[in-house]
Amino acid sequence: MDNNDKINFDLLSKYISENDVLVDVGANSGIYTDFFIKCNNNVGKVYTIELHPNTYNILTKKYKNNTNIIVENYGVSDFNGEAEFYLGCNSFTHNIIGHDMNFNRNNVGGSIKTITLDELLKNETKIRVIKIDVEGAELKVLKGMVNTIHKVDYILLECHLDKDWVEIRDLLLNTYGLFGVNISTMNPITNNSDRPYQLFIKTRENL
């Protein structure tokens, strides 16, 4: 856990209660899943979604006795189907976009089933927090949650690529009508804001 995670945990802990539905998109080793189950006293529900099959297998073993955690092996995207996934330099940096954050081409790791959050969460009526850390695929994830966006209260989003930021910003603020702050400064996101690394989003202004 790095300092960014500690800051995020302090922020999110104010909003999570027992029985909340929480979603960890890009779970890796389960740092946020562990935090989520601590916050909801392990009586809510946590969706834990991980791209890499080996990491997914580790997570299924880790949480095999916890019926409150739903572990899934998907590439969360803007379509339901199948795609190639790509290997990063470590377990934190695998993705479905084919390159790292410096646009160096990554090697193919295999194929993965893709899913939208609309499909994954279609049976949920209320979601408290969705955390999204997908190494450059965040625009795809956001495009795949048109129906989910109005069922979730808060989103923690890592934004990795300048090239996608204008479209992400417009989608969040103007298409979805959301409210966000740059976590490092706590300044509101506007239509002129530069890309934040981490963004805290509220779906309603008074939340």
Image (tube, helix red, strand yellow):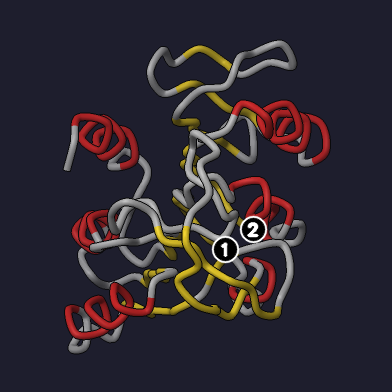
User: Dot 2: what SS?
Assistant: loop
Which quadrant does the N terminus fall into? top left
Residue occupying image coordinates x 56% and y 60% = 96
Q: In the rendering, at what x and y percent does residue 18 appear?
A: 30, 62
Q: Please state which of residues 159 and 92 is positioned toward the viewer in this rendering.
A: 92
User: Dot 1: what SS?
Assistant: loop
Q: Please state which of residues 96 and 37 is positioned toward the viewer in this rendering.
A: 96
Q: In the rendering, at what x and y percent does residue 65 appear?
A: 18, 88
Left/right placement of residue 13 relative to residue 134 reads: left
Q: In the rendering, at what x and y percent does residue 157 appear?
A: 50, 40
Which quadrant does the C terminus fall into? top right
Crowding at mark 1 (Cα within 10 Å: few <14, some 14-19, many 20+): some
Q: Are marks 2 and 1 in contact (CB under 8 Å)?
A: yes
For label 1, the residue is 126
**Residue 30 visible in the current orientation:** yes
Decide: is 29 above or below 58: above
Q: Image quarter for residue 34?
A: bottom left
Measured Cα–Cα span from mark 2 to mark 1: 5 Å
**Residue 49 visible in the current orientation:** no
Decide: is 59 above or below 67: above
Q: Amino acid at mark 1?
A: Lys
Residue occupying image coordinates x 32% and y 33% = 11
Q: In the rendering, at what x and y percent does residue 180 appear?
A: 58, 27
Label placed on residue 142: none
For label 2, the residue is 151
Decide: is 87 above or below 158: below
Left/right placement of residue 168 relative to residue 158 reads: right
Residue occupying image coordinates x 63% and y 40% = 203
Q: Please state which of residues 95 and 193 is positioned toward the viewer in this rendering.
A: 95
